[in-house]
């Protein structure tokens, strides 16, 4: 039991270290955490426009013949340089997104329609339509299988390395 507690403490130390240190070197927090978590805490708001509506066949084997509805939007937001990205700041960079919508709400959106957009101010590629009928974008870094998994795996490994050092200072196993 003490091993699990020690590992959990080590993991927490690594994650907090990432959250405090990596933004200082140019890696935004939006790259380190799951996109859903980042989007739910996003504070940036702007207006965007619907550029395209489309339906694609569902890839779910239990829903053969059904379609998924998507709305493509574009909006402008400030770009902050990131460590391995373009180093030139842009106050009004154009971002594009593809947002899933329900079949019932698909007809409510029209091409050219203005929509409110919510985005992470440090990492605008994580964005979505800020309406009950909208949702989070699915493309690029906003996808569930994106770069945040690299930081998660790195945190797991570093916590495994740090855990034995914590044994020397606290929570020793009884032999």
Image: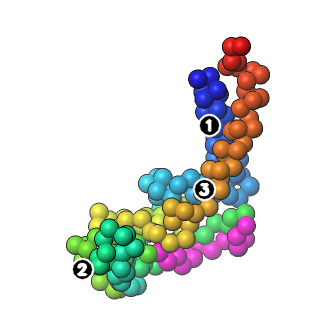
Residue 83: percent from left, percent from top = 73, 63
- As helix, strand or loop, the secondary structure at mark 1 comes to helix
Asked if disc 3 and disc 2 are in contact, CB closer than 8 Å, the reply is no
Residue 14 at what x, y percent from top left?
Answer: 67, 40
Residue identified by numbered label 3: 149
Say if residue 3 shows up in the picture: yes
Tell me which label, 3 or 2, sits earlier in the chain.
2
1 or 3: tag closer to the N-terminus = 1
Q: Which of 165 and 60 is in front in this view?
A: 60
Q: Measure how far apart labels 2 and 1 are at the Cα level.
A: 45 Å
Disc nearest the viewer among 1 and 3: 3
Q: Residue at 22% across / 72% down in the picture?
A: 104
Q: In this view, does 166 lie to the left or right of 69?
A: right
In the image, the segment drawn in magenta is 84-97
Q: In this view, does 117 lie above or below 22?
A: below
Q: In which quarter of the image is the N terminus?
A: top right
Q: Nearer the viewer, residue 113 or 5?
A: 5
Residue 152 position (above or below residue 123) = above
Left or right: 42, with 85 as reference point: left
């Amino acid at each position: 039991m003490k091993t699990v507690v020690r590992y959990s403490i080590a993991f927490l130390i690594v994650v907090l270290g990432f959250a405090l240190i990596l933004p200082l070197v140019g890696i935004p927090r939006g790259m380190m955490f799951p996109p859903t978590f980042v989007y739910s805490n996003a504070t940036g708001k702007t207006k965007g426009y619907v550029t395209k509506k489309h339906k694609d066949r569902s890839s779910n084997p239990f829903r053969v013949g059904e379609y998924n509805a998507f709305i493509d939007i574009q909006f402008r937001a400030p770009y902050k340089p990131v460590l391995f990205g373009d180093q030139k700041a842009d106050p009004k960079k154009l971002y594009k997104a593809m947002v899933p919508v329900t079949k019932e709400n698909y007809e409510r959106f029209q091409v050219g329609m203005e929509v409110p957009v919510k985005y992470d101010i440090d990492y605008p590629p994580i964005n979505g339509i800020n309406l009950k009928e909208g949702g989070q974008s699915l493309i690029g870094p906003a996808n569930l299988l994106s770069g945040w998994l690299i930081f998660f795996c790195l945190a797991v490994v570093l916590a495994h390395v740090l855990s034995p050092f914590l044994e020397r200072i606290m929570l020793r196993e009884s032999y």
